[in-house]
Image: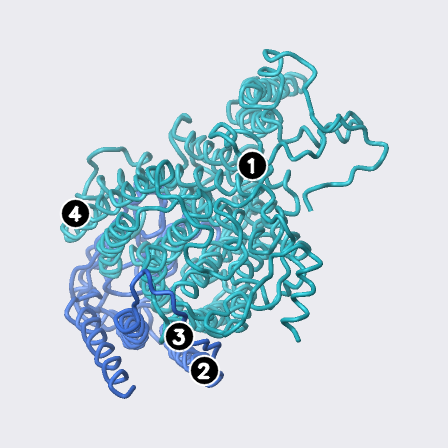
Chain colours: A blue, B cyan
Amino acid sequence: MRKGIVQLVAIGVVIGVAVALVAVLFQWLPESASEEFDRIQDIYWFATWMSVVIFAVVAAVVVYSVWKWRVPPDDDAEGPPIHGHTGLEIAWTAVPAILVIALGIVSAVVLSRNAEEKEGALEVRALGQQFAWTFEYPELGDFETGELVLPVGRQAQFTMESVDVIHSFWVPNLGQKMDAVPGIETEIFVTPKRTGEFAVVCTELCGLGHATMRAKARVVTPAEFDQWIEEQRT
Amino acid sequence: MTATHPSPDVQQYPAHFEPPHGSTWRTFFGPGLVRGAWMTVAGFLIGMLLVLALRWWWGWEPLWNTEVILVVGGMVLAPIGFLAGIGSFDYWLHYISGRPTRPEDHSGHGAKTWKDYFRVNTDHKVIGIQYLVTTFAFFTIGGLMAMFFRAELAQPGLQFVDSQTFNGLVSVHATLMIFLFIIPAFAGLANFAVPLMLGAPDMAFPRLNALSFWLLPIAGLMFVASFLAPGGAFGAGWTGYAPLAEGQPLGQTFFNMGVQWAGASSIMTALNFLVTIITMRAPGMTFWRMPLLVWANFTTSLLVVLATPFIAGSQFFVMFDRVMHTSFFVPEGGGYVLGYQHIFWFYSHPAVYIMMLPGFGIVSEVISSMSRKPIFGYRLMALSLLGILVLGFSVWAHHMFVAGMADWLRVPMMITTLLIAIPTGIKVFSWIATLWRGRIHLTTPMLFALGFVTMFVIGGLSGIYLGSVPIDIAASDTYFIVAHIHYVLFGGSVFTIYAGVYYWFPKMTGRMYSETLGKWHFWMTFLSFNATFFPMHYVGLRGMPRRVFDYDEAFGNMNLFISIASFVLGASFVLFVYNVITSWQRGPVAEANPWRARTLEWQVSSPPPIFNFDEIPQVVGGPYEYGVPGARHAILTPTKEAQKEAEEVHA
C-alpha cells in the first residue's frame, strides 16, 4: 500500500511539474502596462497555482487507477463494495470551499482597489460607434481623436458611451475592459505604468466591422502628453 | 401509464383499427409526411392571407411586409400545419370533437422498419432514437459550419466569406450545437433510458413526448434556413444581444422564433420527465434507489421548466421590437439595453447546467459499472446535483461583469459562482474515488467518461478564473471564453454524449459497436480536441477577441494550427458515424447485459420488449451494489412472487 501511495504521488508530481512548466514557459499574458493589470496578474497566478495542483491530483488518480486496476475484458470479478468515506467527503467539500473563498476575497479586494478613483485622475471619454473609437479629453479641450494617448503614471478615468450598439473597450496590455452601452454611461480606471504603443480592440460583437474596430493607444511621458494636447487644440 | 382510460361516453373504434378509406385517400389525408407537407404549405398560405387581409383592412402600407408574413405564416402557422399534418394532434382533436379516437392498442408503439422512425410514434424507445439521429444530423451541420469558419480563420483577413456570412456561420453553429444537439441529445438518451431505469412501460405522456420530438426539426430547419433569408443568417451571436439583434437583417427573426420551438420542446420534455420520475417508479424504487442518471434528469428538468420561459420572453421582446416597433430594448424609446442580458442569462446560465447535469448522470452510470464498484458517496452525488440546481439560479450576472451593470452585483455573483465549484468538485472527486481499487474495464464508453472527467476539470478550472471578477475583466469576450465553453461543452457535454451513445448502443440497437473503432475514435477526438481548444486560451489572453473574422497578424500561426487541429477533430467524427452505421447494420448481436450492470434497463432483452417489462420489476436495493454479496437492485418475476422474494431479501 505504501509503495502504491509513493507511486501515486510520483505520478502527481510528474503531471504537476509538466503542467506548471506549460504555465510558466509560455507567455500566457500580455506584458502588463498598468498598475491595475499587475494586480489582476497576481490573482491570475493565484488561480493558476491552485489549478495546477487540482488538475495534477485528479489526473494522477485517474492515470494511477487505470494503470493499477485495469482488467482484461473477460474479467468478471467485482471491486470492493466501498460506498463512501465521510472523512474524505468532508475534506473534499471543505478544502475547495476554503480555496474558492480565498480566491473570492482576494478578487474582491483587487476589484475594489482597481475601481478606486485617485486624486488628479485624467478624465477620458471613449465613444463607441460602428466601427470606430473616438476619444475626448473634456478637461483639456474641445477636440476628438481616433488615437488614445495617455500620460504614464497618472490615473485615467474612462467614461464610456455608445451611440448605436454595445461595444467593449479593451487594451490587452492595460488589463481593464468595459462595455460601452447605448443609453447608459460606464466607467473604468487605468493607471499606465510604462510607455509604449498598444492596441485598442472592441471585444463585444457589434456588427459587420467588429473585427476591424481597432485603434491605437500610446502611453507617453507627461511632457510628451502635454505637447500632444497642445497640438490637438490647434 | 400508457393506457389511458377513456370515459364510457367516448366512442372508440374496434380494437383492430381499420381506416375507413382507400389507400390513396389515406396517403393524402391520413397522418404522415405527405399530409404534413401540404398542410405546411396550407398553414403558410393561411398566415399570409391573414396578414394581407388585416393590413388591407386597416389600410397599412405597404400591403406586403415580408417579415410579418414570415413570422405569422412561415414560423407559426406553417409549423403548426406540419405538426397537424403528420398527426401529432389527431388523438386530441378527435377526443375534443367527440369523434371516435384511435383505440389504445399501442399500434403506435415499436418500430418494425426504418420508415416507422419517420412517423409520429409514441414509444419512448423509438422517440429516443429519433432524437439521437436528428440531433447528430444537426451536430454534423453545425460541425461543418465550424470547419468552414475555421478555414476562414486560418489566416488573418477575409478569404472565403463576407463578414455577415461569417457572423452568421458563428451564430448558427453555436445555436445548432446548443439547441439542436447538446440539449436534445441528452433528452434523447434520457428518453430511451429513464423509463427503463424506473421500471416503467413508457413515459407518463407518450403523445406529448412525440410532439416534443417533432418540434425539434422545425426549430433546426428554421435556424439553418435563415441563411436563405435576404441579408443572410442571423449574425448577432447565439446570445443575440440587443440592440445589435434589432438591427440585424431578416435572418434574426428565424432565431427569435426557432428558439421558441426548441424551447417549447424542452419544456414539454422536461414536464414529461418530472411526471414520469415522480409517478411512474416501479414498486420499491424510492428516490434513494434511483440511478444517478434519473436524478440528473430530474434536476435538469426542474431547471428547464423554471428557466426556459426566460429565453422565450427575451426573444419575443426582441422580435416585438423588430416587427411591432415596441421599445423594450431601444434606449431612445425608454428601453433598457441591459435588461435583455439579465433576462437572457437568467435562462442561459442555468442552460449550461441543463447541458451538463445529464452528462454527470451518464458518467456516473458508466464509471460505476465499468469499475465494478458502487458509486462513491451516492447520496452526496444526488444532493450535489440539487446544490448545483439552486446555486445555478443565482449566478447569471457573471456573464455581465463587464457589461456595465450595477457594480454592487459583481461581488455577490462572484461568490455564488465560485461556490458552484464545491458541488462540482464533490462530483469529480467522487468519480475518481469510484475508480479507486475498482476492476476497471477500459471500454470505449469508459474512455470517454475518463476523458470527460479530466477535460471537464480543465473547463471547470478555467471557469474559476472567469468567476474571479478581475480576471474576467481581462479575459471576457476573448478566445479564452471560446476555449472555456468548448472545454465545458465539448470536453464536458459532447464526451458524455459519446459515452452514453456507446454505453446504450447495444441496448438500443441489439448489436455491439466495434470496440477497436470506438477506441480510435476516442483517442483521435481526445487529442485533436485538445490541440484545437487549448491554444485558444493563449490567443485569448494575449488579446484576440472572440467572434472576429480578422485578427492581429501575431496570432496567425497559432490560428493556422488551431484550424488544422479542428479539421482532424471533424475527421474523427467520421469514424464514429462509420462505426455506428456499420455496427447497427451488421455488428455482432448484443447480449441483454454486456456490461453486467445492475440498473433495470440491462435486465431486459436488447433491444427491450415493446412494453419494456413483461413483468413489473420489484426494486429491492440500490442501483450500484457491485461487490456486495447477495445484493440486488430489482427482482423481475411476476408480481406476487416478486413480493414474496422481496420479503425474503428484507428478512
| Residue toward you, B309 or A118 | B309
**Location of mark 1 (residue):** B110
Residue B487: x %, y % from top left? 33, 58
Question: Residue A57, percent across and down?
Answer: 31, 76
Mark 1, Cα crowd under 10 Å, few <14 / some 14-19 / many 20+, is some
For residue A88, say whether it is visible. yes
* Mark 3 belongs to chain: B
Front disc: 4 or 3: 3
Q: Is residue B142 above or below residue B433?
A: above
Write down the residue under mark 3: B433
Q: What whole-number distance in Å separates the C-alpha atoms at marks 3 and 1?
A: 40 Å
Circle 4 SS class: helix
The reply to whether callout 4 and callout 3 are in contact (CB within 8 Å) is no
Measure the C-alpha gap from mark 2 to mark 1: 50 Å
Label 3 vs 1, first from the N-terminus = 1
Q: Nearer the viewer, residue B56 or B612?
A: B612
Residue at the disc numbered 2: A94
- What amino acid is labelled 1 in the image? Gly
Q: Earlier in the sequence, mark 4 or mark 3?
A: 3
Tag 1 subunit: B
Q: Label 4 vs label 3: CA separation?
A: 40 Å
Q: Which chain hosts label 4? A: B
